[in-house]
Amino acid sequence: MMPSVTSDLQAGFSRLLGTPHCFYIVATGAGAGLQELLWAIPGISGILVGAEFPYAPEATDRFLGFRPESYCSERTAIALALEAYSRAYLPRGAPAVGLGLTASVASTREHRGEHRVFVATVGDTGVWVYSMTLPKGVGWEYRARDGDICDTLGAVALLDAVHQEHPRRLGLGLPAYEQVKRDELAMEVLLTHPLFAVSGKRPEPPANGNGLTLFPGAFNPPHEGHVWMAKEHGATFHVTINPPHKPALTVAEVLQRAKLLEGFPRIFTVGDPLYIDKARRFPGAKILIGVDALERMLDPKWGVEIAPLLSELRQLGIRFLVADREINGTIQTLDHITGAPMDLCERVLRPAQHLAMSSTKLRAATP
């Protein structure tokens, strides 16, 4: 990289030290020079959470938790940035930014396809993708040139993501690139692997609910009662991204919720706001709910006919594990629910200190 561009990059990155952000970067080959440029800045550890260089395909698979369809594509850059954001995010910490970069660049042999670079960032402004086609060449000189271009495009993307103007010199000699907002595509990429396993892998979601105990909710935020119930029943946290009567979650909010529920399997879905919707998606499942949630499900004022609802739940093989709750100072149990379908329900207990806990109260108490 030209010394003048290098110095401008580091000058631009030095301004990051004054921004209220933290970030994590990952490059699967070209673009790895970003790590060296950032590392050279004294004090950068205050905002740079980490960096990865998963160069071999197997290393990329491990980083993502799954094998992508292509190792150099817009979707893979987004998937890398999503995982990078997850690693940068800390509850009540500075706003996080994740950057993913993947490229096909010059080598000692001519490639059949185009040389391309894709950079994606995930942050508080949404998901942005930068892409360009590199002038094609063969040999060490062209490879070094491509590496410089990828480093520079990554720097532009990172500075944009943290609302810092990048030095004009960064654009000199940089081939024309496209910059587009990709929130919808990022959600699609995320939901291609909606299950987050405890191991960090992103396996295929279950085809049905057999052997599965779902714990539906918003978990905003999760509390000790949620944790106890999930542990006690080996449950998988289930968050509907577009819940009824609430705004749909953004990509960043889904990743934040996944981080808050770390240590447990959790699955994110769209289009199943009601319990019957979840039952249709996961027939044969056990569903862990509070007694207050069961009472709401059986209330016809929500517009659902109860008799057909219960009949379909029986056909789908659903069983509800119903936890006690303290409501208005009184312990409510399954026995207090008039018309409760006892053949579909099983009472489960919660420790007394957790009965009155709620995410709503926790949000209200958090400054």
Image (cartoon, rainbow, N blue to C red):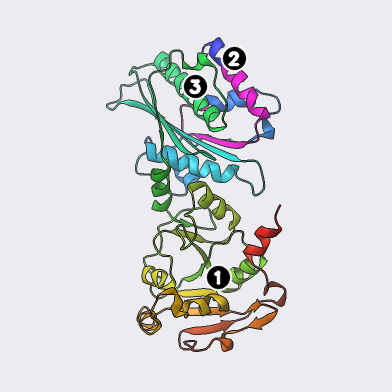
Q: Nearer the viewer, mark 3 or mark 1?
A: 3
Q: To which residue does mark 3 refer?
A: 152
Which mark is on residue 7?
2
Give 6 or 165, whichever is nearer the viewer.
165
Which mark is on residue 68?
none
The quarter of the picture where residue 221 lies is bottom right
Using residue 63 as the reference point, say whether residue 11 is left or right of it: right
Which structural element holds mark 1? loop
Q: To which residue does mark 1 refer?
A: 234
Q: Amino acid at mark 1?
A: Gly
Which structural element holds mark 2? helix
**Between disc 3 and disc 1, whose residue precedes?**
3
Q: Nearer the viewer, mark 1 or mark 2?
A: 2
**Between disc 3 and disc 2, whose residue precedes?**
2
Residue 31 rendering spot, x and y as whole percentages: 49, 27
Q: What range is drawn magenta here?
A: 7-32
Residue 112 rendering spot, x and y as whole percentages: 27, 26
